[in-house]
Amino acid sequence: MKRITYIFLFLCIVLGAFADDVSFRASAPSQVVVGTPFQLTYTVNQRAKDLRAPEFEGFDVLAGPYTSQSSSTQFINGTRTSTFTLTYTYTLMAQNVGTFTLPPATITVSHNTYNSNGLKITVLPEDEKPDTQQQGSAGGNSQAGRTSQASGSKDDLFIRTIVSKTNVYEQECITLSYKLYTLVDVAQFTNNTKIPEFMGFVKQEVDLGNIQTNLEHYNGRNYQTATLFETQLYPQKSGDIKIEPASFEAIVRVRNQSQVRSIFDDFFDTYSNVSRQLVAPGVTIHVKSLPSGRPQGFSAGVGSFTMNSSISATELSTNEAVTLKITVSGTGNMKMLKTPQVEWPEGFETYDPKLTNNTRNSAGGLTGSKTFEYLAIPRASGTYTIPAVSYSYFDPQAGAYKTLSTPPYTLQIKKGADDNNAVVSNYVNKEDIRQLGSDIRHIYTGEIKQSSQDKVKFGSWIFWMLYIIPLLLTIIIIVVLRKRIRDNADIRKVKYRKANKEAQRRLRQAKKMMTEQNEKGFYEEIERALWNYLSDKLSIPTAELTKDNISQLLLERGIDQNTIDELNTLLRNAEFARYAPSQNNTTMQQMYEQTAELINKIN
Amino acid sequence: MQRLVSISILGLLIFVGLSAQTYDAIESTYESANAQYNAGNFAQAAQLYEQLLDSADFGDEQAYIYYNLGNAYFRVNELGKSILNYERCLRLQPGNKDARYNLEFAQSKIIDNIDQGNTFFLSQWITTLRNTQTYRIWMWLSIGLFILCLVSLLVFLFTRPIALRKTGFHIAWLAFLFSLCSLALATAAYNHRNDKNEAIVMQGIVNVKSSPDRSGTDLFTLHEGTKVRVSDRVGEWVEIRVGDNIGWLREDNIEYIVH
């Protein structure tokens, strides 16, 4: 029982090995012409039997299947390799124009059934009837035929300039290719090729690999075609940009038809190489500038993009690195994309982002992704938020700006073991308010009142009235009260008014002397008080005062005779007492009182 | 009679209601414009502010709308329009510090580096002083000081104590001097506010010609946001002065600050 199991297992392995090696493929030209036979082959690399071909719908089977086998064995460095090929060939002919799909065929290799690949065949219409010139050539006018073949007919061999779009936005990708259409046998292209400069574009050449030829129906003829050159262009400015024509030099193999027809001519044609200059026409690209209203954080990207972001950690200690990864993927002018601006909070040491490109060419421009890795090291503990990074691009399909954004990340930073700040002494580094950036100030959001129109217009008569009216008022006041001003201005009047006060002051002085028993001083003071008082009152300088004119002036002022007599007595007594002292205290007291009384009376 | 009164009261109520309603509409436009601005929809905010300026006249308070409009334009990179509106705001409120700051900020983004105005320190100082207040405040200050001068004169003339008289005398002549200064500043401020000859370049790049026609020699180029002084006009062309440069450009390339 066990043995059987082993054998079974062994068989399985062997079969598996076989199964891995079997390759069963169908091949046929991808473009064929109606009414032209072509070959469909099925190739298998093991001995096989029982080919079941599908229904060739839309095709007539003209012949087949023919089988052919080939095998080879090689010894290289003592290792034996053998190959075996079994080929089934059908000759088919298309009935109708269109695209047809041939389902897979099946074949049996040592009791296992294998499927081939399916095939898609485009059937092109027949050539339209060749024009008269060619008929002429067929009719025997070899001279004409030769020129037509060698250098003439533009329809035989030409290059088309194929542009994916002619109306684009700035930075939007277009694909430009030069495609050869030929009915003749092109041997090769020389180096004498002139590709335009593509001024105004950034170009990205597409590597075509081996040139592949295809059959294409164009303008009623079936041409062999090959793409000679392909590039992607990104317009850098708006307006109409002209692409100059390109020129190629092709070497064409032409059959020599010698003038002298010999019997061999029909069997041994000789060929000669003729060079032909081919010009691919220029094109004009209409480039629209990107619309205004470009958002903040515009990436300069044109195309369609998506953005992903991830962060290496959200909880970490100080001095541990954190990496924020932002991946922008999509199709468009990937090369031009700016680095997204990440606003790290204060307290993070940041480094320039690392950029990884992973892009390839595609129809709409470069496709792939760009990864930006931002490394930062927090130097202070706390909770920080990295704000959302917004990244906008222009979508030419929608004709609008679109904005992508990452989520904001919140980072918890703990104090690390080697945190320098942990061992700070009492000394604290003070910092001024640091200007981190500058921006305009915010809008005014307060209430707006509908202010009333001002009544006083600058320079109006009301305005000047505001000066003139107070001025007039002042002038009126001055005119009305001018007497008072004169009074104020008249010094004699002032003295007159002040005479009483001055006399009182001197009397107080005299009283002080009386208490000090200074008799001489007392009498002097009394006398001076009287004389000064009279001088001020009568507006006569002291020097001009005599007892006589005092009496007269006082009389004129309507002071009665008694008072004048009293005054004269007092003056005489005072003068007398000054020069004959030793009066007693009572006399002094009496005289003081008398003087005070008199001054009151005259006043 | 009673009926007449009631009708007139009704009419008054309707009138008040209507004006209140339009005022409410204006208020809500203003608030939604601010909301749009705060939400980052600067273009819509600018449109609403423009609408607000068209619909109502707020007198000097209009300055705030000009200021906000300037901010909104600044956000959508319309440097020329932004500077124009800041200038308009400052014409109405020369003392608006935010507007002056933002104007200077916006001017720092202009490409043209032109030494504007007089560099003599005294005239700069006077301009700064003039700009601290509106012309109306200078006007009332001048009138007030003149009245103070007269009152002090009366005090000087009609009082007796020497100290009071002396004080009155000094206050009178000082007040008179300051009143004259204020009047001068008020005149300067009033003239500046209504100065119709200053304009802002609206075109991204414009060539200034030597004569008022297309074939004139290009003298120099100006960029969006630069302030120019218009000194002459010929048809569609204006003669402008920028710093020491003089030349001609088309009138539709500039926008007057006061129109």
Image: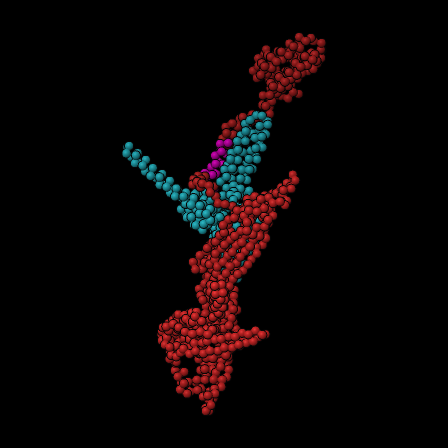
Chain colours: A red, B cyan
Span highlighted in magenta in the image: A459-474
Q: Is residue A323 above or below residue A570?
A: below
Residue B213 is a magenta residue: no
Whole-percent x and y of residue A575? 68, 13
Whole-percent x and y of residue A224? 44, 76
Residue A232 lies left or right of residue A593; in this view the side is left
Q: Is residue A133 above or below residue A568?
A: below
User: Farthest residue in the front direction?
Assistant: A1
Residue A146 lies left or right of residue A489; in this view the side is left
Q: Which corner quadrant of the image does residue A126 belong to?
A: bottom left
Whole-percent x and y of residue A40? 42, 75
Q: Residue at x 43, y 70 (%)?
A: A111
Q: Residue at x 57, y 28 (%)?
A: B165
Question: Overall secondary structure of the magenta stretch?
Answer: helix
Q: Residue at x 35, y 39 (%)?
A: B17
Q: Is residue B248 above or below residue B91?
A: below
Q: Of residues A120 and A238, which is closer to you in this image?
A: A120
Q: Of residues A318 and B236, which is closer to you in this image?
A: A318
The count of marks equals 0
Is residue A406 visible to us here?
Answer: yes
Residue A465 is a magenta residue: yes
Is residue A250 visible to us here?
Answer: no
Q: Residue at x 49, y 65 (%)?
A: A3
Whole-percent x and y of residue B185? 53, 42
Q: Of residues A222 and A549, which is closer to you in this image?
A: A222
Q: Quadrant of the N terminus of chain B?
A: top left
